Amino acid sequence: MNFIIFDLEWNNAYNYKLKRGMNEIIEIGAVKLDENLDVVDTFKQLIKPQLSRKLGSRFKNLTHITIDEINDNGIPFEKAFDDFAKWCGRGDKLFLSWSTSDLYTLVANFKYFENTVYVDFMTKYADAQKYCMSFIENASAANQISLSHCAETFGIDTDSANFHRALEDCMITALCFKKVYDHDKLAKYIHTCDISFFERLVFKPYYIRETEYEDFKLNDVKIICPICGGTVAPIKKYEFTNNTFRGAGLCEKCSRKFWTYVRAKQTYDEVVVSSRAVPINKKRAKHIN
């Protein structure tokens, strides 16, 4: 199996069509490693922006890429990734990037510029950051480390490295990856990139507002009395506020009254329902029927 480590640099631009900000890819870099983890080829390409003619100050300060450099050497997004796909070639290969942020940005750009979320040249993917962090004490999802920190931890000299340029970041990632490569352990981090893999990346979970929606029916939600364990039956029509259905109910077992709360969240795979009952004070309960 060969390995392709890629890195993207992007500019945050306002997308007037979507009416929100979007990370537009400006540079792609990649290194190709053979089965011995030796670098056999590299790829580097600037991409001409289509959403904004201006580069953000943060992007310029991090990458030192200028608009003149892009105008002289950049090509359209579609052409850049067509060239990249050809460069990647066929055969068994694993794509890696330092954190999944590059992957999310890649899929978002494909969705906008190519009208598809399916990155067809990518068949297997692993998060190099997550994999490398598994070898570092005290590193976790809540305490992620930067590429430079990881390189320093692994004893890799980066004094002359130009971080935040795509190809150089790939080279440093490759060195980190090579330091801790373990075939069996890596297998646990590999994802198969079918269409559902990419759809899941761009799917945004949302709260259901309707009382009946596909697999969700509000009246079918069973609310348990926190005092006796009985069933709390509704006695007041639900209202929807702050992503929550709010109502009142009466426990069929102990006859206590409760404020009832139900949330239904649509995820990519299923509807996740949560509910709770909060006792109503006796004075207030007398006026709720």
Image (tube, rainbow, N blue to C red):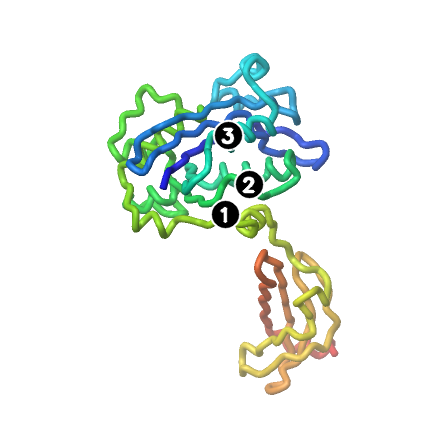
Please tell me how crowded label 1 is: few (under 14), some (14-19), or many (20+) other residues with Cα within 10 Å: some
Contact between marks 2 and 1 (CB within 8 A): the answer is yes
Q: Please tell me which residue lies in front, 160 or 232.
A: 160
Q: Give the image location of residue 146, x and y in percent.
A: 38, 35
**Residue 119 marker:** 2
Specify the farthest residue to the left.
Answer: 155
Please tell me how crowded label 3 is: few (under 14), some (14-19), or many (20+) other residues with Cα within 10 Å: some
Q: Quadrant of residue 262?
A: bottom right
Residue that badge 1 annotates: 193
Kind of residue at disc 2: Val
Which residue appears at 43% of the width and 29% of the height?
30
Q: Is residue 287 above or below residue 18?
A: below
Q: CA distance from mark 3 to mark 2?
A: 12 Å
Q: Please tell me which residue lies in front, 41 or 168.
A: 41
**Quarter of the picture holding the N terminus:** top left
Specify the farthest residue to the front.
Answer: 91
With 50 as the anchor, is 26 left or right in this view?
left
Q: Give the image location of residue 27, x and y in percent.
A: 51, 25
Earlier in the chain: of badge 2 and badge 1, it is 2
With 91 as the anchor, is 109 left or right in this view?
right
Please tell me how crowded label 2 is: few (under 14), some (14-19), or many (20+) other residues with Cα within 10 Å: some
With 218 as the anchor, is 186 left or right in this view?
left
Q: Please tell me which residue lies in front, 147 or 192.
A: 192
Q: CA distance from mark 3 to mark 1?
A: 17 Å
Residue that badge 3 annotates: 84
Which residue appears at 72% of the width and 68% of the height?
238
**Quarter of the picture holding the C terminus:** bottom right
Q: Is residue 7 above or below residue 218?
A: above
Kind of residue at disc 1: Cys
Kind of residue at disc 3: Phe
